[in-house]
Image (cartoon, helix red, strand yellow):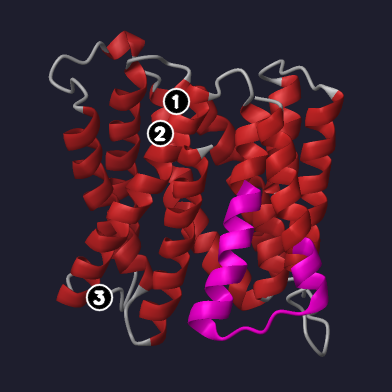
Amino acid sequence: MIFILFAACCSVAVSILLKKLASVGYHPLSMVVWNYASASLLCFLWFKPNLLNIQVAQVPWWLIGLLGIILPSIFLALSRALNDAGIVKTEIAQRLSAVLSIIAAYFIFNEQFSAVKLIGVTLGIFAVSLLVLSRETGHQQIINKKGVPSLLCVWIGYALVDVLLKYNSSLGQGFAQSLNLIFVTAFLFSFIYCSLKENCNLWGKKNIFAGLGLGILNFANIALYINAHIALKSSPAIVFASMNIAVVVFGILGGIFFFREKINSQMLFSLVLAISAVLVLMSTM
């Protein structure tokens, strides 16, 4: 569980910094590019994968290519969804991807659900829903037709990353090699995409340094998340649910502390539910 908590902290820190930096003139897409350059180097130094003697036939190239495209694409979909549909609806789509991930744990990874585990997962999803919905104030945000595709991409994309990273963690010693290649592919894909965009400011010094710093947090988030799947390899649903719950809880706290968002009674009740859900899930380990 400690891996999940630290992974969630890193995930929220990335979001907070992206929002802060974008508000003072940094270019988000450029930072995403250099973030994957940093993550690629850190992955190589930390896991020490053997990239010199790659057994081509044994490398899951489909997984590397797919995640290499999906990871940076999610940042773009997230940005588009925030612009077209609003932050509340985007957060719902992002965090409720846990529903798809948990369904995958049952149907793809053949995880057996005990009554206690099912209660914890259900309680957690309910808590996440209340936490996100409690952020709406005054008028209700309306999803226009333009925002629907980006919201669907966020919802499906985050669930797909969860499932694919779970699969990557099951590769044994080969997971570090494939993870490093995933980061390199994500860097190359986002670099080419950004180079073709106008006004991307890819080579701006502040964007480079900010992106490299974000890459440290992003790598820590994904590495810790994979370690959580390895430590709890027989219970992927616990990892899926706990990670989403923790991210929303820390996100709410970060919003209060960094952006002066006010907490209401519904949000407080939701926090209590979320913490209870984590405790229930921990009791099944």
Q: Is residue 196 visible?
A: no
User: Do the residues under discs 2 and 3 have CB atoms within 8 angstroms?
Assistant: no
Q: Name the residue carrying label 3.
A: 201
First of labels 2, 3 by sequence position = 2
- Could you tell me which quadrant the N terminus lies in? top right
Q: Residue furthest bottom?
A: 138
Question: Any magenta on residue 103?
Answer: no
Q: Residue at x 74, y 45 (%)?
A: 277
CA gap, disc 2 and disc 3: 26 Å
Horizontal side, residue 20 vs residue 263: left or right: left
Q: Are marks 2 and 1 in contact (CB under 8 Å)?
A: yes
Q: Secondary structure at mark 3?
A: loop
Residue 156's label in the rendered image is none
Q: Is residue 26 shown left or right of residue 69?
A: left
- What residue is pinned by disc 2? 65
Q: Which residues are magenta?
A: 244-270
Q: Nearer the viewer, residue 274 or 247?
A: 274
Residue at 38% across, 23% down: 61
Residue that label 1 marks: 62
Type of the residue with mark 1: Trp
Task: Report the quarter where the C terminus lies.
Answer: top right
Foreground of the two, 161 or 152: 161
* Residue 38 horizontal side relative to residue 91, left or right: left
Instruction: Identify the secondary structure beneath mark 1.
Output: helix
Tag 1: Cα neighbours inside 10 Å, few (<14), some, or many (≥20)?
few
Please identify the quarter of the rendering in which residue 51 is found: top left
Q: Position of residue 160 (x, y in %)?
A: 60, 38
Residue 150, compared with residue 235, is above or below; it is below
Is residue 163 or residue 83 the one in the foreground?
163
Q: Is residue 17 left or right of residue 113?
A: left
Circle 3: residue type:
Asn
Up the image or down, 187 lies above or below 269; here it is: above
